[in-house]
Structure formats: structure tokens, C-alpha cells
Amino acid sequence: MSGDFQDWMTSVQARVEAALAECLPRAGIAARLHEAMRYAVLGGGKRVRPLLVFAAGELAAAPEDALLASALAVELIHAYSLTHDDLPAMDNDVLRRGRPTCHVEFDEATALLVGDALQARAFELLAAPGLIAPTRQLKLLATLARASGSLGMAGGQAVDLAAVGKTLTQPELELMHAMKTGALIRAAVFLGAGCGKTALTDSRQAKLDQFAKRAGLLFQVIDDLLDCTASTATLGKTAGKDKAADKPTYVSLMGLAAARDYAESLRQEALQSLAGFGAKAERLVALTHFICARRF
Amino acid sequence: MSGDFQDWMTSVQARVEAALAECLPRAGIAARLHEAMRYAVLGGGKRVRPLLVFAAGELAAAPEDALLASALAVELIHAYSLTHDDLPAMDNDVLRRGRPTCHVEFDEATALLVGDALQARAFELLAAPGLIAPTRQLKLLATLARASGSLGMAGGQAVDLAAVGKTLTQPELELMHAMKTGALIRAAVFLGAGCGKTALTDSRQAKLDQFAKRAGLLFQVIDDLLDCTASTATLGKTAGKDKAADKPTYVSLMGLAAARDYAESLRQEALQSLAGFGAKAERLVALTHFICARRF
């Protein structure tokens, strides 16, 4: 990882972290809910989706305030989904980012409302006036909403829960992940490039989306490898929980070595999709390597 | 209730019902989630919030397609909140609109995802291209998101849960309800009038918002009266559950007779706020009477 990329990443992460702290309410009559929202969002996470927003924004010379609003919206959607996924009725997990999950630290009802309110806040932030041309901003909103809903993230989680104890084929597993984690990663990339003053050409947009699909899948395969091989301390969340929950993963489907090979081929495909963008894609390229460099 | 109003109401309800059935996905890989979303939304409910959207739209000669998108968005937010509120971690209710609640008919994880996906679908619908001037559409989106979040509906539910077993003062109770049910009712009225080609003057907007605040409070006081005096069969949901849950209500705070008087004075104030709008406010006036005419 080049020092330049490291500096860029640290800078984006710091801006996102500060803006997240700023955009979440404090105190008021619902003070406990606000405290729990801050707990669920702040002080952890690599902010991979915001990094993707900013990196994709470089393809289109997108303005900082629009990128930041998009990054916050995507990250709040991600944080709400983690909070709800951890609930006893779903994955029933007690550890997240090295701390008790939200419903353990607070209570189930609060964690439920945290997720609901974070989702609303995400759309509120992305509907702020004056970010980019309003027609294009509506398109970003619709894209994020669609990626989050029953045809995207929420639908993928439903399929994942229904798959417990079953043997999925690789196409079934891939469709589930394309929805559960892939849709939001694609949306992050779409939003970043979509914040530019002018839209990408259709063929460039298609190439970028091809990259985003591969990157989303890559992210998931790496996650499965980590869940299988890393320790709970390294992950900051319960290791081996997919296996314990009898959930199908790339490792359970393909075996460890083949899953590693698959990750490598996805990385190559992702990078190839970016080839036509030249130096403007530098951050996306570096991020792709960064995703793979997580320890496993 | 005049025959004319009855016809208008039946017509709006039929259009909303058909459009709700149309806007919710069927089948697909997340077929069970889609089935549960339809179960949670369709086949019940008086659609009071959509009626408010359409009635407020008459003040501004708003176009049908924008009103319908707004009505659907508000109703989907309402339906998601009912689905989540009924969960065991929240109000733990088993009956809604005369049928088992969503988590009883399906399961808790599905009901959780139903709410999440309905919220996303609401914002997706309201972000559809070409409804009204895009800048004004962004304002509607931001308003609905804010009304749904921790400073509105979700925050109100958090305060309500925290109030169990406590004695609230009337101002505290009023603030809680202004958030929990009032915020979405205000948003419905704002969206309806906001769909018009031109914005209302500031003073008219303020009058309309005054109406919406009174109407929201009125709705809640009537709800408390019904919970206390109507049967489970009439309500289609568990009667007397506020008392059973030791929740503060207007009836527990003021007594039955004073709560009835309070409802009457709120009705008068609501109607006074509409006086300056003349015949264009006819539907809102009739709806106010309709809200009060529910049996108690």
C-alpha cells in the first residue's frame, strides 16, 4: 500500500468519522435512543463503503459536500443493517467491532428503533438541498433505496436466513450475496460517480458497475475466508459464526484453497473493469488491493 | 357524513389500495419476504394518512400521480412502524386489523425485515422521477424522512416505551404523541399540499401546519378513547392494551369525560385553522369530522 493511498484513506476516514458524529442527534427527549444510535455508528468500522464513494467520485471530479452526504447515507444504511442483523431474532450476535452489540449494550427495542431511525436519517441526509442537480440527486436517492430494500440488502438477508442448514449452489450463493452485501457496495460506487457534475457515458457506467459487482463479491469471499480463519480478537466480531450457524459460505462450498483462488480471480476481473479509466481510477484500484489485504 | 365525501373517500381508498398492491414486489428469490410485506400492508386499514395527503392536495390543485406517490410513501412508513411496534421486543401484540400480526403469521426475523424493506420502498417511491419540480420533491423526501426518524415517529416510540409504568404530565404526553403519531400526520398534510405546482404562502403553510398538529393530537386522543371503551372485535386490534401495559394515555391522565371534552376542543381548533382556505378545505374539514366519528 503506497503512502499516498494511506494518507488519502486516513483523510477520508477522518472526514467521514467527524461528519458521522456531527449528523447524529444528541440528547433531546429521545436521548437514550440518540445515545444508542451514536453507539451503533461511531467509534469503529473501516468505512469501506464511504471510501468507495469517495474513490468513485474521483472518476467524475465530484464535489466534496455531495460525496460526504452520499458516504454518510450509505454508511448509516450499513450501520442500521448490522444493528438489525445482530438482533436475537436474526443472527443473534453479541460482539461487533470489539464491543457488545447494540441490543446487548442497550436493549432489543432500542436496537430495533436505532436501525429504523438510522435508515430514515440516511435518506434525510441524501435529500439535503443544493448538493448536485436535483434530478440527479433523486436518482441517487432512488438507487440507494432500491439497493437497501427487498430486492437488495433486506431481501438478501431474508434469503440468507432461509438458507441456514441448506446446501446452496454457487449461483444461489452468489445471488444471495449480490443482494445482501453486493447491492449496497454497487450503490456506493454508483453514488460516488453520480455526484459528478456530468454523468458518465453509458459504456463507462457499465464498466464501473462491472467493477462494483466484482468488488462486492470479492469483499464477501474475503469475509467468508476471514470468518473461517481469523480469530475473534482480530475480527472484533464472533469468528466462525457462519459455520456455527450452519450457513453456506464460499469456504464451505468450495473449500479454503479454491475460495482463495476465486478471490484472486475476482480481484483481477475487478481491476480489468477499471482499465479504461486510467489514472482517475487509482483510488479504486488501491481500494481493491486493500480489501484483499485484510488478514486471512 | 355527506354522500359526496363518502364517494370521494371510497374513491381515494380504492386508488390507494390498488396502487399499494401494485407497488409491492411479488415472488422472486425473496418471495417469502415479499409475501409478508404484502400481508403487512394490504387488506386492511382506513388509509387515514393517504386520505390526508389527497385532502391537503386539494388546497394546491396537486397532480394525481404526485399525490399517489406521496400517499403510498406515507402509508408504507405507517405500515412498517405498525409491523415493528407489534414485535415482542416492543408492544408484543398478536392482533392487528383483525388478523394475526406479521411476526405471528410469519416469524420475527421476517417481520423485522418487512419493516426495513417497507421503509426503503417508501423512499424509493417518493424519489421517482418526474413527479413534481425536483427541488420541491427533495423537500418532500427530507420532510418525510425527518418525520419518520429519531426526532419524529421512531423517537416517539422510544419515549413511549420508556414511559411504561410512569406518570407523565400532559405536556410530556403531548410531546410524545406529537412525535409518535403527530409527526407522520403532519408530514402527510405537508406532502399533500407540497405536491401542488406552486408552494403555499408562508402564512397559509403555517395555518395548515397548525391544523395538522391539532388533527394529529385529535387522532391520538380518539385512539386513547377507543382503546379504553371499544371492544377488540370493533377495533380489530387488542382493546385495553394501553391500560394492560400500564401506558399513560389521555384517559388515564384526564379521565374519560375530560378526554372527550378535550377531543371536542381540538376538533374546533383544527377547523378554525382551516377557516381561511374556503371551499378548497372541504375535504380536510370532512376528514376531521370523520376522525371524530369513529365509535367510542
Image: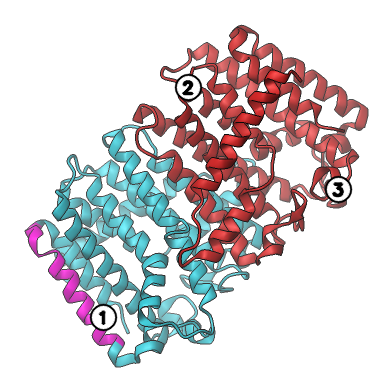
Chain colours: A cyan, B red
> Gap in Å between the C-alphas at discs 1 and 3?
57 Å
x, y percent for residue B4: 68, 18
Q: Residue at x 60, y 59 (%)?
A: B36
Q: Indicate which disc residue B232 carries.
A: 3
- Residue type at mark 1? Ala
Are there few (<14), some (14-19), or many (20+) residues within 10 Å of tag 1?
A: many
- Residue type at mark 3? Thr
- Residue type at mark 2? Ala
Q: Which residue is mark 1?
A: A263
Q: Main secondary structure of the magenta part?
A: helix
Residue A219 lies left or right of residue B233; in this view the side is left
Which region of the structure is painted magenta? A259-279
Question: Quadrant of the image for the C terminus of chain B?
Answer: top right
Residues A96 and A122: in front is A122
Which of the 4 image quarters holds residue B231?
top right
Residue B16 lies left or right of residue B291; in this view the side is left
Residues B12 and B159: in front is B12
x, y percent for residue A55: 22, 57
Q: Chain of mark 2?
A: B
Q: Is there a contact, CB below 8 Å, between mark 1 and mark 2? A: no
Question: Closer to the camera: disc 1 or disc 2?
Answer: 2
Rendered position, B190 above or below B92 = above
Q: Which of the two labelled residues, at mark 2 and mark 3, occupies the earlier sequence position?
A: 2
Q: Are discs 1 and 2 both within one chain?
A: no
x, y percent for residue B11: 61, 29
Q: Indicate which disc residue B62 carries.
A: 2
Q: Residue at x 83, y 23 (%)?
A: B262
Mark 1 falls on what kind of element?
helix
Are there few (<14), some (14-19), or many (20+) residues within 10 Å of tag 2?
A: many
